[in-house]
Amino acid sequence: MAFGVFIHRTDSIYDDSPAEQYQFPRQYLRRVEACVGDWIIYYEPSKVTETRGYFAMAKVQQVIPDPAAPDMHLALIEPGTYLDFVNPVPFNAADGLVERGLLNDEGRISGRAQSAVRPLSPADFNRIIDLAFDASEVVLPRVDETGFQEEQAPFQFEQNRDRVNYIGSRIVRDRIFRRIVLRAYDERCAITGLKLINGGGRAEVSAAHIRPVERNGPDVINNGIALSGTAHWMFDRGLISLSDDQEILISRQVNDVDSVRGFINKTLRGLPPRRPSERPHPRFLQWHREHCFKQ
């Protein structure tokens, strides 16, 4: 088993869904197979406008031939392992190249940098993960219904397995997901349009999974939406939903439709993140309409 880097573009021509599968040609088969059972890091190349650099991690579960495309294969991602980085990591950081395994004997970037799939050394994996979850940036603790704040767990790692075990915990993943979603939505509720900050400087908005974790929903930004308390309650209970083009749908089971219309923003559409790559994916919105929304 070994760590690896998978190159993925937002505008990819491949049948990729980073939280679920990665499509690749036969030439990379051995490299991908070496990653089965271990972690890979997704990298978006600099040719992409507003590249995210190294932007997420996931665990490869298995590799299978693509039944829909001859000479292509699929790396299937282990459910519940995909996680967007709090801080996308650039190819070149303040102290130089992050992925130092790409340097040749002369200290120059080798041709391996062009490979869509490439091995990643434990040292480079650790370096990227440490930058992606910078200890100097506090991941806000959650507050339960009694007002009790969970103790903030520090990002301190000694071994690479400490890193993945820590990040793999549900509490930490929830905190990271909240941080990523709220940043994408500028801490503003997508339904009401309100941006409310309490006296402690904490945003009064939550990061909701469109397809819940307990229903196999991944911790991917496209499966997240920022919602205020009332909007979150209504969304989870299927009283409101979103169409693929962000129109806010109101269930016929709502008793007072006029009041609901008065509380949503004037555009009558969900307010999306600025970056297209962070907007709700139609696949997750469809799941919510079909399995949660009360028509």
Image (tube, rainbow, N blue to C red):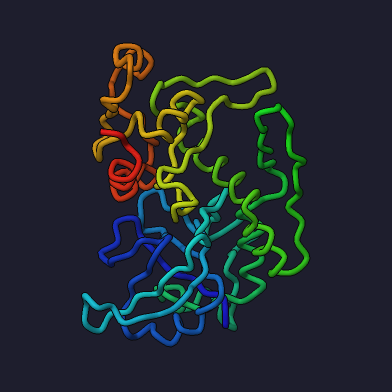
Q: Which residue: 32% across, 22% down?
A: 254
**Quarter of the image where the N terminus is located:** bottom right
Could you tell me how many numbered marks the image carries?
0
Quadrant hosting residue 45: bottom left
Q: Which residue: 66% across, 37% down?
A: 142
Quadrant hosting residue 111: bottom left
Q: Nearer the viewer, residue 137 or 106?
A: 137
In the picture shown, does residue 275 fall above or below 195?
Answer: below
Q: Where is residue 178 in the image (x, y as percent from the top left)?
A: 56, 40
**Quarter of the image where the C terminus is located:** top left
In the picture shown, does residue 130 fall above or below 38?
Answer: above
Q: Which of 117 and 141 is in front in this view?
A: 141
Q: Which residue: 69% across, 38% down?
A: 141
Q: Where is residue 140 in the image (x, y as percent from the top left)?
A: 66, 37
Q: State whether residue 94 appears in this view.
A: no
Q: Which residue: 72% across, 49% down?
A: 135
Q: Nearer the viewer, residue 273 or 104?
A: 273
- Left or right, 123 with respect to 238, comes to right
Q: Where is residue 228 in the image (x, y as percent from the top left)?
A: 49, 26
- Left or right, 219 with respect to 164, comes to left
Q: Position of residue 47 (x, y in %)?
A: 36, 58
Q: State whether residue 25 appears in this view.
A: yes
In the picture shown, does residue 116 fall above or below 147?
Answer: below
Quadrant hosting residue 27: bottom left
